[in-house]
Image (cartoon, rainbow, N blue to C red):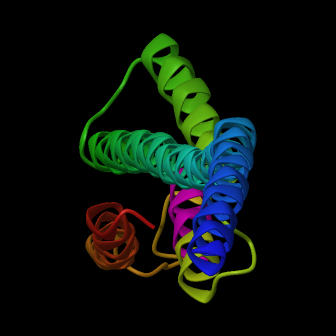
Amino acid sequence: MDSLYVILKSLQDNSQSTQYLSLVIALLAVSFGPILSYFSARLTIKHQLSTFKEQLSTQISIAERGIKSQVLSKNRQDWINTLRDSISEFVSILYMVSKAKLSEHEEKLKAERLFNLRLRISLLLNATEDDHKQLEDFLEEGMDYYVRRPTKKTPQRPFKEIRLDIVDISQKILKREWERVKKIE
């Protein structure tokens, strides 16, 4: 019987230590659970914030490129329109002057406009591109035609050839630039 008492007593002591152990584990779980949850949540928030910053940066970059492309495309389109209008007016004045008898006043007005257009076109062209240089040469030839007016003593290339050369090279330049606008370069 003594041995039964000792066994029951030891079970009772084990039961108390098990209860203490359970209590300590419960206290640890209650204490460290929120701490672990806090650090886990903090890491998750840092990761989400980092991901959000990357996404925002990417979206800003895409938006900036889109805006830049739109502005560049609009500016190039304006350049094309200005160049085309200036060249067509230049050629039409040259044509009119070559065909019509103008009064001195009309002649002076046309000359001023022609020189103004010639300068505007030059400023619109890129002096480093071959076809732009070629257009410059044809425009200069057109100006020479206007200033010198061919006579039997000083023959020049016919105006029709000069006009066709100006139109042809202008169309090539404008076509190439239009293709760049369509590609949004």
Of residues 110 and 4, the one drawn nearer to the viewer in this rendering: 4
Q: Is residue 60 above or below residue 143?
A: above
Percent coordinates x, y for residue 172 in the rendering: 33, 79
The image quarter containing residue 101 is top left
Residue 122 location, quadrant: bottom right
Q: Give x and y (percent) for residue 53.
A: 64, 46
Residue at left offset 68%, top offset 68%: 10
| Location of residue 123 in the rendering, given as x and y in whole percent from the top left corner | 69, 49
Q: Can residue 157 be seen by looking at this rendering?
A: yes
Q: Is residue 82 above or below residue 122?
A: above
Residue at (38%, 78%) from the top-left corner?
Answer: 169
Q: Is residue 40 left or right of residue 109?
A: right
Q: Is residue 164 magenta?
A: no
Asked if residue 147 shows in the view, the reply is no
Q: Is residue 138 magenta?
A: yes
Above or below residue 98? Residue 110 is above
At horizontal 41% and vertical 50% (from top left) the residue drawn is: 73
Instruction: Depth check: give the residue in front, 18 or 6.
Output: 6
Image check: 169 left or right of 28?
left
**Quadrant in which residue 70 is drawn:** top left
Q: Magenta span: helix, strand or loop, mainly?
A: helix
Chain part drawn in magenta: 137-147
Q: Quadrant of the N terminus?
A: bottom right
